[in-house]
Amino acid sequence: MTSMMAMGEPRLNWDVSSKNGLKTFFSRENYKDHSMAPSLKELCVLSNRRIGENLNASASSVENEPAVSSATQAKEKVKTTVGMVLLPKPRVPYPRFSRFSQREQRSYVDLLVKYAKIPANSKAVGINKNDYLQYLDMKKHVNEEVTEFLKFLQNSAKKCAQDYNMLSDDARLFTENHQRANKIVRNYRAEILEKTRIQRAFKEVKAMLENFNEELETLKEIVDLKKN
């Protein structure tokens, strides 16, 4: 069945150029546009519905779910969803939105391209001091947000570890190729280190032989002087 699906569906293309951070920057507005949460208009429509309709819709949705919760939990779930749409709660809540707006994100990218290669506390000639200080300040906050987001990803991976038990054929192939490439790189590095050790040992032996030859020549000269 998996092979039939693989033949019928197009393979995933992993070489996709990124859009976010180039011309499009993530913001709260973009999140709302692509979010599954209901909009304000949809919430107004739902709030005008009769409570009985919402209860029936909520109860039917609960009945269609797998029987993993008790009847009491189902009733509580129905009560909390009156006038609302049943949406799955995130297992690991998203920490927060970035403090930077779209305009600030674009400004930071421009400053990053301009000053990323300049070392800290540099006195390079021709740089705009105000822009450079702004870049350093924004970089500090960006690093804090990156650290916070990586921690969120780590917690998500730990709490949702069972999600990794099932992989699509393309994802499994990508993972295997990635691991194989890492193994090749590690073996190559080990070979380079081994060759470096051999070359270093060869140079040391060569230097010892040269010193030995010099000492031997010195001894020959001493012997010749004593004979004379």
Image (cartoon, rainbow, N blue to C red):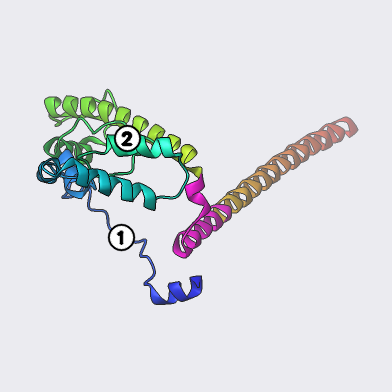
**Secondary structure predominantly adopted by residues drawn in magenta:** helix
**Amino acid type of the residue tagged 1 in the rendering:** Val
Residue at figure coordinates x 65%, y 42% from the top left: 200
Viewer-nearest of discs 1 and 2: 2
In this picture, which residue range is highlighted in magenta?
Answer: 162-183
| Number of numbered discs visible in the structure rendering | 2
Q: According to the image, label 1 marks what residue?
A: 16
Give the vertical position of 133 relative to 6 (above or below): above
**Amino acid type of the residue tagged 2 in the rendering:** Tyr
* Residue 172 coordinates in the image, percent (x, y): 50, 60
Q: According to the image, label 2 marks what residue?
A: 94
Q: Is residue 25 visible?
A: no
Q: Answer few, some or many: residues within 10 Å of disc 2's Cα (few below 14, many 20 plus, some between 14 and 19).
A: few
Circles 1 and 2, Cβ within 8 Å, touching? The answer is no
Residue 94 among magenta residues: no
* Residue 160 coordinates in the image, percent (x, y): 46, 42
Give the vertical position of 155 relative to 165 (above or below): above
- Picture quadrant where residue 76 is located: top left
Residue at figure coordinates x 47%, y 48% from the top left: 163
Residue 179 among magenta residues: yes
Residue toward you, 210 or 42? 42
* Residue 59 coordinates in the image, percent (x, y): 32, 46
Measured in 3D between alpha carbons, the distance from the residue under mark 1 to the one under mark 2, in whole angstroms, is 25 Å
Residue toward you, 11 or 123? 11
Q: Secondary structure at mark 1?
A: loop
Q: Secondary structure at mark 2?
A: loop
Quadrant location of the C terminus in the rendered image: top right
